[in-house]
Amino acid sequence: MSAPVILSELARELASEATSDPTSQPTLELIPHHAADVRRHARTDTLRVALLGCGNIGGALVGAVDPSLGIEIVSALVRDPARVRPLPASRVRTRIADVLADRPDVIVECLGGIDDPAAMCERALAAGIDVVTANKSMLANALPALAAAAARGGAVLHVDASVCAGVPVLDAVARLRWARIRSISGIVNGTCNFILDSLAQVGATFDGAVQEAVRRGYAEPDPSADLSGRDSVEKACLLAAAAGFGAVRPGQVAVQSLVGPDGGPSLADIIALRGLGVAVRCVVRVEWTADGLLLRVAPTVLDAGDPLAMARGTENLVTVDTELAGTVTLRGPGAGANPTVAALLADLMACRERRAGWATLVPLAPAHVVSAAREERVVACVSEWRKSPAELLEIARGVGVELRGCEFRRESAVVDVVGSRVALDAAMTRLRAAGAGVRAFAAGEGLGLG
Ligand SMILES: NC(=O)c1ccc[n+]([C@@H]2O[C@H](COP(=O)([O-])OP(=O)(O)OC[C@H]3O[C@@H](n4cnc5c(N)ncnc54)[C@H](OP(=O)(O)O)[C@@H]3O)[C@@H](O)[C@H]2O)c1
């Protein structure tokens, strides 16, 4: 069972909470066609997808959908129908009722905001239409009501794209809840991390780093949602929900802004901390304690060896500490259109799989397997070499192996070489014929030797 379905179980729990609270009862009418119609329609091979919003994310998703995926974008809701879009004008809509009349199987919400998208998504879910969203603000504020609507309509709400973009953090956390999560620690705001990381450079200032984050498009022109911690707070709520800790409102998370009364951290702070072997990062902490759930977002000093201190630039990094599965770490680019689209596509394919059944989707044609790369990089430890270093290098060059680096000691050497498998084997055969012992190792990605 895929993680979004696990999240829908969570959604049912949240729904029961939501429906017991009269203030959170959905008030919208169902769309005119009922859920059974939607399901009959969904039995076709192609997944009919409607977008709510066709800006950065919606537009990038249109560009990434290719017919081989079995997905058709049937319409898109926008504010301004006159603007040029990456899909035909005949598919552009300005009223949610017209989008629903297109009878989509799935709606991808990429509007932004809270109340309008929540009302539209509730309406779709209650009518049995699955919803995929990257909108953390809507989810953090309206998850119980959305979950109630999904439970009523028998639809699934897919949320993985809303936290850490293409890094499947919510899916992983939802699976790990069965390993009994003790705590989650994470760097989930790439903008703050970029600013803190930039401060490590000579001459950097906090304001300069903020401006650079805006210039590069990492931060909004108004970066207050990132700097105040609000963005991380919303993500903390979703991490807690995915972990099975229950529904949390943003106001329940203790938060400390990156900008204190004396301004943001300075290069001098970073240098002073580094001198003590520690680093500062904006950390989200979700911890299950004997007293209840602890939720905090704060600039945090970490041991330099802490995995969270390793996050570079706009990277996101989340560690999940569990009783049964130990500590699990996820790391990668946590923002941007392409990583977000990757997560939305994965959720869309999960919708398609759920409707079509796995058997029709698992690719059973033989895979084209390439057993070895054309060129390989190898680190070889050569022992009992009683000839000169030059003679060893001559053997390597003689069979077409390129030398990247080498270190000679008495009668031994470590050589870092690149070549075809045939050339590498020939070099090793010649070395052994000359009386040497050779142990070869594959070189790890990014290894730096000599
Ligand atoms: N950008 C990213 O890198 C990123 C990454 C992860 C998650 N997200 C999330 O993805 C969502 C969308 O972000 P985005 O950057 O794509 O925003 P965007 O570029 O501003 O696009 C928003 C789209 O929604 C439409 N829209 C907004 N309100 C509407 C309304 N009330 N009725 C009809 N149409 C409406 C806009 O129409 P017009 O085009 O006519 O104005 C536009 O097409 C947000 O929730 C954001 O947090 C974004």
Image (cartoon, rainbow, N blue to C red):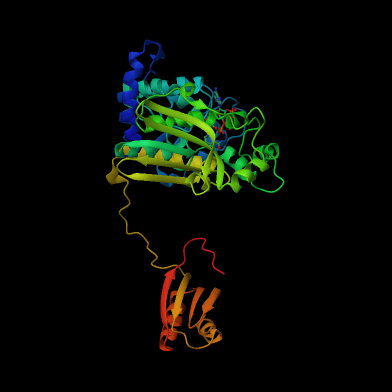
Q: Is residue 253 left or right of residue 148?
A: right
Would you say 397 lies left or right of 429 here? right
Which of the 4 image quarters holds residue 41?
top left
- In the image, residue 109 sits, relative to residue 278, either above or below, namely above
Q: Nearer the viewer, residue 244 or 334?
A: 244
Residue 32: x and y in percent read 38, 18
**Front one among 377 and 93:** 377
In the displayed image of the protein, which residue is found farthest to the top? 22
> Up-down: is 102 above or below 1?
above
Q: Is residue 140 visible?
A: yes
Percent x, y for residue 175? 33, 39
Q: Is residue 297 above or below residue 321?
A: above
Residue 128 in picture, x, y percent from top left: 35, 25
Picture quarter with ligand 1: top right
Indicate the quadrant containing the C terminus: top left, top right, bottom left or bottom right. Answer: bottom right
Residue at the spot 44% in from the left edge and 89% down from the top edge = 434
Evaluate whether residue 158 shows in this view. Answer: no
Quadrant where the N terminus sits is top left
- Total labels: the figure holds 0
Farthest residue to the right: give it: 203
Image: 279 above or below 249: below
Q: Seen in the image, is 406 located left or right of residue 177?
A: right
Q: Residue furthest front?
A: 276
Position of residue 422 measured from the top left corner of the image (x, y, whole percent): 43, 78
Relative side of 41 to 427, left or right = left
